[in-house]
Image (spheres, rainbow, N blue to C red):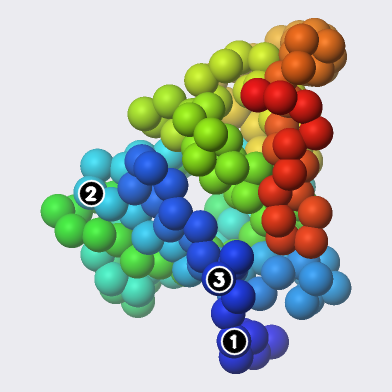
Amino acid sequence: MAPRETVDTRDRLTTSFGEEFLFKDTAADTGGELLRMENRLDPGVRRPLHSHPKQEERFVVRSGTLGIATDDGEVLLEEGEEEVIPAGTPHTFWNAGDGEVHMETEHRPALRFEEFIRAMVALDEEGGLNDEGMPANPLVGAALITEFQDEMQPEDIPKPVQRALFPLLARVGSLLGYGVPAVRDGSVTRDSPQ
């Protein structure tokens, strides 16, 4: 599938902690088969250990050095190298060099991962993320993970705790006015106050 020729400015998102996303092929473009993004990581950026329960993730490095760790060990990828992470595999990735890392990522199937990214960036813009790029408020974090449980799961909290506690915390958060930004047609709205 060829990437779109024009890119809407809503397709480029930047975080305060040094990560950038440029949506190239979305679920809408590919009938749900693929979300393809160009990504940039500043030096020192490391994403927390996580998994994508129902999505395969493919990394292709365009420039810089990307580190990836799974239970099988760590790899360092240089320009032109790639790595595929099967669905459900706990992993983390980071900028392993001194300069920016430019890469392309693919999530198959796309599911709602674009919405997840847009919600996280909206939270960041509201000051709702900590320095590691994670929700600062645990009620918002629980709501986010409950809403996007097929797309993203933290690996530092046991799954039974996530299944039992997160929906309850999300419900309490909703009653108190905390929630996840809603994404409609590429724009982010807030159904309840942060």
Disc 3 crowd, CA 10 A, few/some/many (<14, 14-19, 20+): few
Residue denoted by label 1: 6
Q: Is residue 36 above or below residue 177?
A: below
Q: Residue at x 75, y 49 (%)?
A: 183
Q: Position of residue 34 (x, y in %)?
A: 71, 68
Task: Looking at this view, name the residue that lies furthest to the front.
Answer: 193
Label 2, secondary structure: give it: loop
- In primary-sequence order, the first of circles 2 and 1 is 1
Total marks shown come to 3
Query: Which is closer to the viewer, label 3 or label 2?
Result: 3
Residue 43: image location, x then y, percent: 23, 49
Where residue 165 sits, quadrant-wise, is top right
- Image quarter where the C terminus lies is top right
Whichever of callouts 3 and 2 sits on the residue coming sooner in the sequence is: 3
**In the image, is residue 68 above or below residue 144?**
below
Kindly identify which residue carries mark 3: 9
Could you classify mark 2 by the number of other residues whose Cα lies within 10 Å: few (under 14), some (14-19), or many (20 or more)?
some
Amino acid on which the number 1 mark rests in the picture: Thr
| Closest to the observer, 165 or 169 | 169
Q: CA distance from mark 2 to mark 1?
A: 29 Å
Residue behind mark 2: 43
**Tag 3 secondary structure:** helix
Residue 87 at least partly seen:
no
